[in-house]
Image (tube, rainbow, N blue to C red):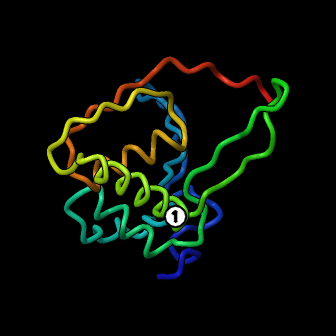
Amino acid sequence: MDAAAVMPRNFLVSVGDARPASGDRPSASRIYRNAVAVDGFPAPLPATTLYELFQASVAAFGPERCLGWRPIIDGKPQAYEWLTYTETAARVDAAASGLAGLGLGSGARVGVYGVNCVEWMVALQVRSSTRTPPALLHAQQQSLPPS
């Protein structure tokens, strides 16, 4: 699958005009859709679990950007850094292997407590890949200052 064919540069396209107010009828903005659904919605991916969906995404978009973060140096946000789908899958596999090495497999209860970050998303995928019950807890996260 060609990633450029599925992920256009302009994600929203107009599919309907704006409507001015008239009498008791309020105005309405233009109608927008995601660019991949201009002519209807795409066929669903052949996946029945989040892990299968992630694996299909890795196969389709391996070298594309998957997870990004902004390092903070001296309190200042830096340029985004990225992991590709392939790199993310490698981290998921390594973390899942580590849990298996500890004897924690399907059905084990593993709690993950943290802020939204690359590691939290990897933990989510590990949970899906090892079929452990969800026990993901969010911590309070401070917002970054405007860049």
Query: Number of labelled discs?
Result: 1
Q: Nearer the viewer, residue 21 or 133?
A: 133
Q: Is residue 92 left or right of residue 78?
A: left
Residue 32 spot, x, y in % from top left: 50, 51
Q: Position of residue 136 (x, y in %)?
A: 33, 32
Estimate how packed mark 1 is, as few (under 14), some (14 to 19) or many (20 or more) residues with alpha carbons within 10 Å: many
Q: Is residue 46 visible?
A: yes
Work out whether residue 113 or residue 24 is closer to the camera in this orientation and state it.
113
- Camera-nearest residue between 135 and 29: 135
Rendered residue at 24%/71% (across/down): 46
Q: Would residue 13 be seen by someone viewing this image from the given angle?
A: no
Question: In the displayed structure, would residue 125 be above or below residue 38?
Answer: above
Residue 112 location (% of width, % of height): 37, 32
Q: Quadrant of the C terminus?
A: top right
Identified at 54% across, 51% down, the residue is 17
Please identify the residue farthest to the front as the structure is shown: 102
Residue beneath disc 1: 85
* Residue in the picture at 56% in, 21% down: 141
Type of the residue with mark 1: Tyr
| SS of the residue under disc 1 | helix
User: Does 14 sit left or right of 52 as displayed?
Assistant: right
Toward the bottom, the furthest residue is: 1
Residue 93's image quarter?
A: bottom left
Q: Residue at x 32, y 62 (%)?
A: 53
Q: Residue furthest left?
A: 107
Q: Position of residue 75 (x, y in %)?
A: 81, 24
Q: Nearer the viewer, residue 75 or 60?
A: 75
Whether residue 49 sits left or right of residue 94 in the image: it is left
Q: Is residue 50 above or below residue 80?
A: below
